[in-house]
Image (cartoon, rainbow, N blue to C red):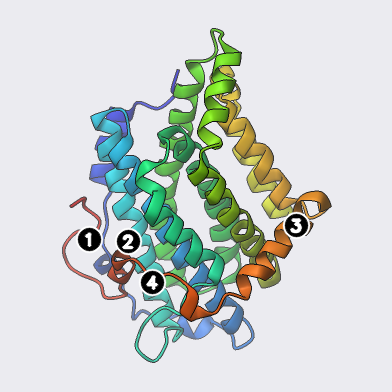
Amino acid sequence: MATVDLDKMLEKIRNTQWALADIDWDAPGAELITEEQWPKLRAFMTDLVWIEHIGGRGFAAMAKTAPTETLREIYTYFYAEEQRHANAEVALMKRWGMLDENGKVPPPNNNIRLAVEWLERYGDDLDYRVLGTVTPALEVALDGALCKFLLDTVKDPVCHEAFAKINDDESRHLGVGFAVMELYGSNKVTGRINMALARTVGRILKPQIILGAAVHMPLLNKMRDNVVRAGLPEKKLYQAMAKFEKIGGRTEAGRSNLMFRIISSHMKIVADRNQKLYHIPVDLMVKATDMIPRWALPKKPSWVGEVTWQPTDNNDSAPK
């Protein structure tokens, strides 16, 4: 059974909301960003902001398809929190002089842009179990590798204050994510493994899922290589993926979730550059998407423009 009381978790989420205005964005410390790390940090933060958009859109889709009213409300909060995380990261970029001349975040790389478009087009029609397994895997990578790397690298205390709040939110995202994976795994523990396998294969062989894999595989490869170039040790990626496998598979219910086992295996392959049979063709996909001209990419969804570095006094993360 799930190890998290979702009703208590919802109450905790309601009571732990915060706003950008809670942080003094003009406090000393911005000068601690060195000239050497500034360009790589700007690229890293740009990718991070756009990843928050992808996570937020996934939670918005789950808020529409979750099986209970409690989960629907939780995911509505999580969607708003991902938007707030993006806003906080943009505020840090503003603080460090990393926005463009119009005060906007630099455009995303082509792989992120295509992933945003795919989620916008198909997100609301995706199977809840697929999103409910993929999202915790990405959040483990974000929380266990990317954000930890950022805090180990950046000395600005305002950055640490902002990410202390962000990481508190992410811990609740992961708690719910793993609880939901166990909940769906427990339905398969008592038998009917072949039926469970057939249902799982049916979910992942839908055309929109196959297209999504074609979009997300090069995105994951590109993000993996970008953070390694920025200075993240590869062993940190392995540790993050091991954490996902360990926590997600800590119970029989979790281990019996076939979608979890598929995603866990895939994430380990992504982290391991020695898996040549996987990485060579996916790297070719990365090169192909890099060649797409900006004018040929889809237009950004309107909700992307909602990101802002400007703090407000009201609680800017409450569900609308």
Which of the numbered marks, if any, corresponds to residue 281? 3
In the image: residue 217, left or right of residue 124: right
Proximity of marks 1 and 4: CB atoms separated by less than 8 Å: no
Query: Which of 60 and 292 lies nearest the eye of the viewer?
Result: 292
Does any portion of residue 232 appear in the rendered image?
no
Number of other residues with Cα within 10 Å of mark 1, as a class: few under 14, some 14 to 19, many 20 or more: some
> Quick one: SS at disc 2?
helix
Q: Position of residue 241 (x, y in %)?
A: 65, 44
Amino acid tagged 1: Asp
> Where is mark 1, residue-wise?
316
Between disc 3 and disc 4, whose residue precedes?
Answer: 3
Q: Is residue 299 above or below residue 259?
A: below
Proximity of marks 2 and 3: CB atoms separated by less than 8 Å: no
The residues tagged by marks 2 and 1 sit, at their Cα atoms, a distance apart of: 7 Å
Proximity of marks 1 and 3: CB atoms separated by less than 8 Å: no
Amino acid tagged 2: Arg
> Where is mark 4, residue-wise?
299
The residues tagged by marks 3 and 4 sit, at their Cα atoms, a distance apart of: 27 Å
Query: Which of 291 and 57 lies nearest the eye of the viewer?
Result: 291
Between disc 2 and disc 1, whose residue precedes?
Answer: 2
Q: Position of residue 307 (x, y in %)?
A: 32, 69
The residues tagged by marks 1 and 4 sit, at their Cα atoms, a distance apart of: 26 Å
Q: Is residue 150 above or below residue 30?
A: above
Number of disc labels: 4
